[in-house]
Image: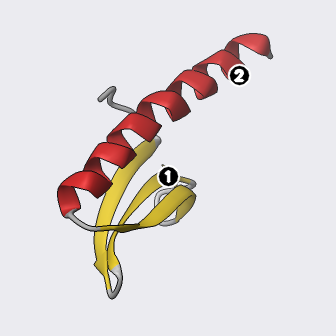
């Protein structure tokens, strides 16, 4: 998974299973969830989804930077 200082993944356990999130660092004290999905049976499934979505998310972000 590519590293980014602005984006990170977070995997949490919920009542219905596991949840994966892509979190954007808005400021030093504030974070915003950019993309989330829940209902995973295991932590590994949630982490795999978050890792694959992070790759796609960073690629789109890089493409948008070049078009400006």
Q: Which residue is mark 2?
A: 64
Instruction: Mark 2: give few (<14), some (14-19) or many (20+) Cα within 10 Å.
Output: few
Task: Name the quadrant containing residue 61.
Answer: top right
Q: Nearer the viewer, residue 5 or 63?
A: 63
Instruction: Mark 1: give few (<14), some (14-19) or many (20+) Cα within 10 Å.
Output: some
Residue 12 horizontal/vertical position (percent): 30, 71
Residue located farthest toward the front when viewing the structure as drawn: 41
Horizontal relation, residue 39 to residue 56: left or right: left
- Dot placed on the residue nearer the N-terminal end, 1 or 2: 1
**67 versus 19 height, above or below:** above
The image's mark for residue 25 is 1
**36 versus 16 height, above or below:** above
Horizontal relation, residue 18 to residue 39: left or right: left
Q: Name the residue rendered at 21%, 62% in the picture.
A: 43
Which mark lies nearer to you, 1 or 2? 2
Task: Name the quadrant containing residue 11.
Answer: bottom left
């Amino acid at each position: 998974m590519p590293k980014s200082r602005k984006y990170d993944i977070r995997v949490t356990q919920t009542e219905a299973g596991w949840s994966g999130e892509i979190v954007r660092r808005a400021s030093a004290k504030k974070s915003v969830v950019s993309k989330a999905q829940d209902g995973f049976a295991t932590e590994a499934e949630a982490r795999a989804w978050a890792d694959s979505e992070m790759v796609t998310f960073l690629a789109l972000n890089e493409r948008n930077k070049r078009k400006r």
